[in-house]
Image (cartoon, rainbow, N blue to C red):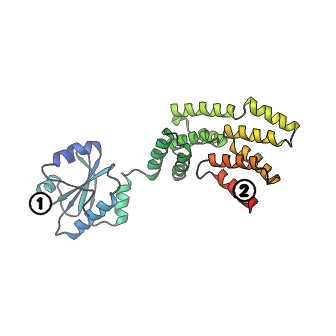
Amino acid sequence: MMTNSLAITLENFQQVIIEESKNQLVLVDFWAQQIPESVELRDKLTAALANHGDTILFATVDCETQGQIAQQFGIQGLPTAVLVKDGQPLDGLTGPQTDESINEFLAKYLPKQQDLLLVQAKDLLAEGNVAEAFPIISQAYQLDNERADIKLVLANVYIQTGKITEAESLLKSIKMIDQDSDYQSLMAKLELAMQAADSPEIQALEQQLLNEPDNVELQQKLAAQYSQVNRNEDALTILFRLVQKNGADIASKDLLLDVLKSLPDGDALASKYRRKLYTLMY
């Protein structure tokens, strides 16, 4: 049960308590074999911190063999755990604890789920994996829809997946105090995406279609253009109508499937059109 923890002795006291606590929080748990409650707290903390070694370093002091260290901390009784930052006690637990009280204590110092998701989404975006970043940053936004840093990353993903309207309303909701350089660069990106979404080529095809509304080839060309500028809903509307009208129109069906494949996992638009296509086929 003592994995993921570091036993403190006089030899490593300076290194862990003074030096290491400058880089990260150190939770020092004091225990003794003859006090079962202290062994229980030690084991509960070991389990609770098993996946958080990069945020909180868990250290233990066996009071039977390291009484001097317990004295230096001024420990009055067991079980006791002390959270140390920069060599100084920051917070602590005393007396027997439930799983709930331990989680409540640690929650103040451990990163929140949305923080972890935000980091993950940023890493994926940096690697160009927009489709994979989409469901992750959406989840972070569901957990906290007030934070500007989460909104900015989601707006970026929206722009890159053609959800221009969503990106625009999200950026509008960002308060002036949070309108930093990232915000300014996304506004410029949004402007470019809006221009691309209504390019002269698209306008020309739309005009031609007004004159020849039943021209299948023109409709396919326009759908392909829409798809290129991420106007996926417009593309899918056209292509689905074509497939609905003529079940033997393989070219339109292939185009439709290509557009669906290009959408990120968890995209509501993809689910909607997959359902419609399934209903049509069966």
Element marked by disc 1: loop
- In the rendered image, the vertical position of residue 98 relative to residue 17, given as above or below: below
Q: Which mark is residue 277?
A: 2
Badge 2: residue crowd in 10 Å (few <14, some 14–19, many ≥20): some
The residue labelled by disc 1 is 65
- Could you tell me which quadrant the C terminus lies in? bottom right
Mark 1 against mark 2, which lies toward the viewer? Answer: 2
- In the rendered image, the vertical position of residue 191 relative to residue 89, given as above or below: above
Residue at horizontal 34 percent and vertical 61 percent from the top: 102
In this picture, residue 93 sits left or right of residue 62:
right
Residue 150: give x, y in percent of width and height: 51, 44
Element marked by disc 2: helix
Count of numbered circles on the image: 2
Residue at horizontal 37 percent and vertical 53 percent from the top: 108
Q: Amino acid at mark 1?
A: Thr
Residue 14: give x, y in percent of width and height: 16, 45
Viewer can see residue 167:
yes
